[in-house]
Image (cartoon, rainbow, N blue to C red):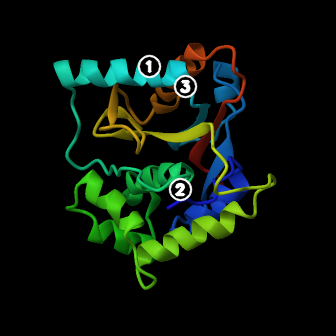
Amino acid sequence: MSLLPLESNPEVMNKFIHLLGVPDKWNIVDVYGLDPDALAFVPRPVLALILLFPCSDKFYEYAKQEADQIKEKGQTVVEDIFYMKQYVSNACGSIALIHSVANNAERLELEKGMFSKILDDSKNLTPEQRGEMLMNMNSNSDAYKLITAHQELAMEGQTEVNPNEKVNHHFVALVQKGGYLYELDGRKDFPINHGATTDDSFLEDAAKVCKEFIKRDSEDVNFTIMALTQSY
């Protein structure tokens, strides 16, 4: 199963999260830089960062080393983190948004509806089972409505989309859960714990993780960073 890729466009992404039941006072905004001066312009509080990055050989090589190290040494993963595997091609944009919203549902005061029901239904499922929900949906399911919304919004982007075209960029979400900063990438074996963080330091701590992604592919300029933040 292959979807149309979602564009890294805050306007399109805001339509998606508001469809999920996120109140209008919360929005996705562009982050124009990772230095302190640029981060000072990002409205607070920030609940998640969404990073779009190039899928290079360096990325895959580092991801394998990172996974092997975690499997050897272990890591802390809090029980209530919402994590789902990605089995549907080009769904990474929607899954990054789902990870951002699902892990902040209480703070967002998520409205009752399609997505809150999906969260309730998948509460006790494994990451693999959650991913299979999207892959094995039927036309009457809430997951089908979610995918339909993804497809419709993907067509609203400013660039021409083709579901069969190879996509060389990937979205991940960075969230704070249980006092830790997690990288949530549905293509990896598990969430990646990037260390302790707080509500106050989350943006700066997540920016450091983004800088590491950029440093590993410093010759590539195709990185985009957005924040899920409160705006009045």
Foreground mark, 1 or 2? 1
Q: Are marks 2 and 3 in contact (CB under 8 Å)?
A: no
Residue 225 lies in what quarter of the image? Answer: top right
Q: Nearer the viewer, residue 95 or 227?
A: 95
Task: Establish if 186 lies above or below 68.
Answer: below
Residue 94 circle label: 2
Give me the C-alpha separation between circle 1 and circle 2. 25 Å
Along the line of sight, the residue nearer the viewer: 201 or 9: 9
Looking at the rendered structure, the kind of residue marked 2 is Ser
Vertical placement of 23 versus 65: above or below? below
Which one is closest to the eye, mark 1 or mark 3? 1
Q: Which residue is mark 1?
A: 61
Q: Is residue 208 visible?
A: no
Mark 1, secondary structure of its residue: helix
Mark toward the start of the polypeptide (1 vs 2): 1
Is residue 180 toward the left or the right of residue 80 in the image? right
Query: At which x and y percent is residue 129?
Result: 27, 59
Residue 165 in picture, x, y percent from top left: 67, 49
User: Label 3 amino acid?
Assistant: Cys
At x 46%, y 28%, the residue is 201
